[in-house]
């Protein structure tokens, strides 16, 4: 075995700039002529080419050198190529492997791919074939690397504070609770008003848990009819009911090894609550229409915007299921109780949505931000996010649309408030920016032209 180190010719450097990998490659083949062909073909296009005549020699070389790609013959003296590839994968080698052979059938190709081959080429092959295979391997490795970096970057970004944005005492306390609860396998019950971010917290608990590599499967218990929910959760056998023309796995099955998030769990009918309780107690499920009990390995996170204690007291929710879900209970605060986080949330949603929408970031005045902190946000964080999204699309803070949602609040206060003043200032500023064009101004404000004209009439504006 020996190594050939190539210094690329300027012409070859140009090829590398076109996408050829600056890789270290190992060629393993017992035929000197084939090794020579591959070294001459790949050497000018890559950083280093090592060569070996057997799997044993190749293994010895790998102990001392990093290799990005192995071009490996199947028929070798001693250990054959497929057996060595299996051994490499079992011991953690993650590089690309191209298997080559002069004697192959479909079964051999399937066995090679199952062993972990990246590509498979039949001898004799020409230069373009091996070069195209190397290109495919390089592209596969590049995409895998980019996906890995992207996943970890997003995970660090999204869950740097457990996915929760804000510096208020309420968010700090909730964040600390998520960090404490995530590593354990206990069932978690999330309580809070609609729009407070219960699914976000559930995803944070999953991402920070030992189950992070498993699936996160959300199901909205309010969006599926009671008749279908049992099948949705547990699956069904063929012929279990009219229309069940084939067996189907349920969401418990798809969540195996991960987390099943039951959103709006209070919407489950009482009969299904009993079935769910049995599944949680026994860690086994029975598909609808089946006599078979299937073991499950899932963590349950449930959420509701109702007061479950009151639901229990009024007979709409089983007490035993409530206590089974409430092993750990986290309550999410409504936005009106931590308004000091609104500037951070606006910045977060702007940075998150502006690149997706192809919009310029929002530049809010102090008066506009003050308005946002005066509003009570009945839709909580979700409502704020929707407002930021509309405003990014329109190119200006959509104050008037929010003002319209605040009619009930204003009706309860007979005296004019600063909200009126800010709305007038905002509309005047938008009208001024479009030289009085009311059609364009109405579009920017997110209201109809008729509504804009009515406001202008109230303020004696022409």
Image (tube, grey):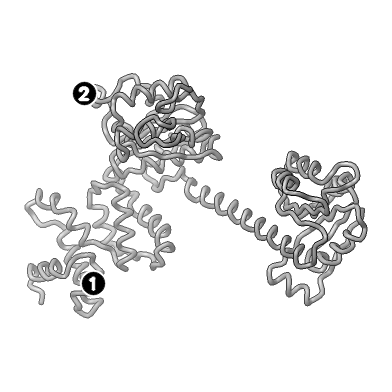
Q: Does 341 appear above or below 174? A: below
Residue 430: numbered disc = 1
Q: Does 214 appear above or below 38? A: above
- 74 vs 272, left or right, is right
Instruction: Give the SS element for disc 2.
Output: loop
Label 1 crowd bin: few (<14), some (14–19), many (20+), radius 10 Å: some
Instruction: Give the SS element for disc 1.
Output: helix
Residue 225 appears in view: yes
The quarter of the picture where residue 346 lies is bottom left
- 90 vs 353, left or right, is right
Which one is nearer the viewer's eye here, 245 or 268?
A: 245
Residue 299 spot, x, y in % from top left: 47, 31
Question: What is the count of numbered marks?
Answer: 2
Residue 68 appears in view: no
The quarter of the picture where residue 264 lies is top left
Which one is nearer the viewer's eye here, 461 or 86?
A: 86
Residue that appears at 46% across and 45% down = 161
Which one is nearer the viewer's eye here, 300 or 268?
A: 268
- 211 vs 439, left or right, is right
Residue named by callout 2? 314
Residue 170 spot, x, y in % from top left: 35, 40
Residue that appears at 13% across and 50% down = 408
Residue 229: numbered disc = none
Residue that appears at 33% across and 32% down = 265
Q: Does 279 appear above or below 436? A: above
Residue 200 spot, x, y in % from top left: 41, 43
Which one is nearer the viewer's eye here, 435 or 413?
A: 435
Counting residues from the N terminus, which is met first, the one under dot 1 or under dot 2?
2
Residue 432 spot, x, y in % from top left: 22, 76
From the image, state whether disc 1 or disc 2 is nearer to you.
2
The reply to whether dot 1 and dot 2 touch (C-beta < 8 Å) is: no
């Amino acid at each position: 075995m020996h190594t050939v180190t190539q210094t690329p010719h300027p012409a070859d450097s140009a090829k590398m700039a076109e996408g050829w990998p600056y890789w270290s490659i190992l060629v393993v083949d017992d035929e000197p002529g084939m090794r020579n062909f591959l070294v001459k073909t790949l050497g000018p296009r890559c950083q280093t080419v090592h060569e070996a005549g057997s799997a044993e020699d190749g293994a010895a070389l790998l102990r001392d050198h990093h290799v990005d790609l192995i071009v490996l013959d199947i028929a070798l003296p001693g250990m054959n190529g497929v057996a060595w590839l299996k051994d490499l994968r079992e011991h953690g080698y993650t590089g690309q492997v191209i298997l080559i052979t002069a004697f192959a059938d479909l079964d051999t190709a399937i066995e090679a791919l199952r062993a972990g081959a990246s590509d498979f080429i039949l001898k004799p092959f020409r230069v373009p074939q091996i070069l195209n295979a190397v290109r495919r391997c390089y592209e596969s490795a590049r995409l895998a690397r980019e996906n890995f970096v992207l996943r970890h970057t997003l995970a660090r970004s999204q869950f740097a504070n457990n996915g929760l944005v804000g510096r208020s005492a309420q968010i700090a306390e909730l964040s600390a609770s998520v960090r404490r609860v995530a590593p354990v396998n206990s069932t978690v019950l999330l309580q809070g008003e609609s729009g407070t971010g219960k699914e976000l917290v559930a995803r944070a608990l999953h991402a920070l848990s030992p189950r992070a590599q498993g699936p996160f499967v959300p199901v909205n218990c309010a969006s599926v009819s009671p008749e279908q929910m049992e099948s949705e959760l547990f699956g069904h056998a063929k012929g279990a009911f009219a229309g069940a023309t084939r067996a189907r796995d349920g969401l418990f099955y798809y969540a195996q090894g991960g987390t099943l998030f039951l959103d709006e769990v209070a919407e489950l009918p009482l009969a299904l609550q009993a079935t769910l309780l049995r599944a949680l107690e026994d860690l086994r499920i029975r598909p609808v229409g089946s006599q078979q009990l299937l073991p499950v390995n899932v963590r349950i996170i449930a959420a509701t915007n109702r007061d479950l204690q009151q639901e229990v007291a009024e007979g709409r929710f089983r007490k035993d299921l409530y206590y089974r879900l409430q092993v750990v209970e986290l309550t999410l605060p409504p936005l009106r109780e931590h308004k000091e986080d609104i500037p951070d949330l606006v910045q977060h949603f702007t940075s998150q949505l502006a690149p997706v929408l192809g919009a310029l970031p929002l530049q809010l005045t102090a008066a506009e931000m003050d308005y946002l902190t005066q509003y009570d946000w009945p839709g909580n964080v979700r409502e704020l996010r929707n407002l930021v999204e509309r405003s990014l699309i329109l190119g200006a803070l959509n104050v008037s649309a929010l003002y319209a949602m605040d009619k009930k609040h204003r009706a309860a206060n007979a005296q004019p408030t600063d909200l009126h003043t800010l709305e007038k200032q905002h509309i005047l500023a938008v009208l001024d920016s479009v030289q009085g064009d009311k059609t364009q101004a109405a579009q920017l404000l997110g209201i109809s032209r008729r509504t804009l004209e009515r406001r202008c009439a109230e303020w004696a504006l022409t």
